Image (cartoon, rainbow, N blue to C red):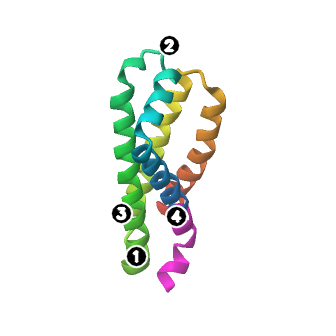
Amino acid sequence: MDNFITHIVSITILLFLLITFFQSGIDKLIDWKGNLGWLKGHFAETFMGKMVPLLLATILVIEMITAICCVMGIYHLVVDNHTFYAILAMFLACLTLLMLLFGQRVAKDYQGALTITCYFIVAIFGLYVITL
């Protein structure tokens, strides 16, 4: 119980990131065609237009890895006070969000980029907290 209290902020952020990336990954798996169609239109006028299937698969994989690392991070923080997976999860979350931000900026979707920035603030704060 002491480890839980010691890492309560990190655990809460990891739960937030777990929900965010797990739900997003599941949505991509369940509605691959819908996501692919929307993104092809979103990036049609950009240099990434022909790479959308590969980029979507890449984002899906890193989102699911991030979600798994969040679960492992929470477990190891509570059980044995190790921070490796929590740090990895928060770093991967930041990396994923930076990739998504790049895509939104390329597509000139500035409102979408602003939304991603809000998630990034949480993730980078979590990375800061866990590495103190």
Residue type at mark 3? Phe
Q: Secondary structure at mark 4?
A: helix
Report the amino acid beneath label 1: Asn
- The residues bearing labels 3 and 4 have C-alpha atoms spaced at a distance of 16 Å
Q: Residue 21 in the image: state x and y as whole percent.
A: 47, 52
The amino acid type found where label 4 is placed reads Leu
Circle 1 is placed at which residue position? 81
The first of marks 1 and 4 along the sequence is: 4
Quarter location, residue 28:
top left
| Residue hosting label 2 | 45
Q: Secondary structure at mark 2?
A: loop
Residue, disc 4: 15
Q: State the extent of the magenta-drawn residues as a range.
A: 1-13
Q: Nearer the viewer, mark 4 or mark 2?
A: 2
Of labels 3 and 4, earlier in sequence is: 4
Q: Residue at x 39, y 80 (%)?
A: 79
Give the mark, 4 or 2, whose residue is nearer the N terminus.
4
- Above-or-below relation of 110 to 44: below
Residue for badge 3: 84
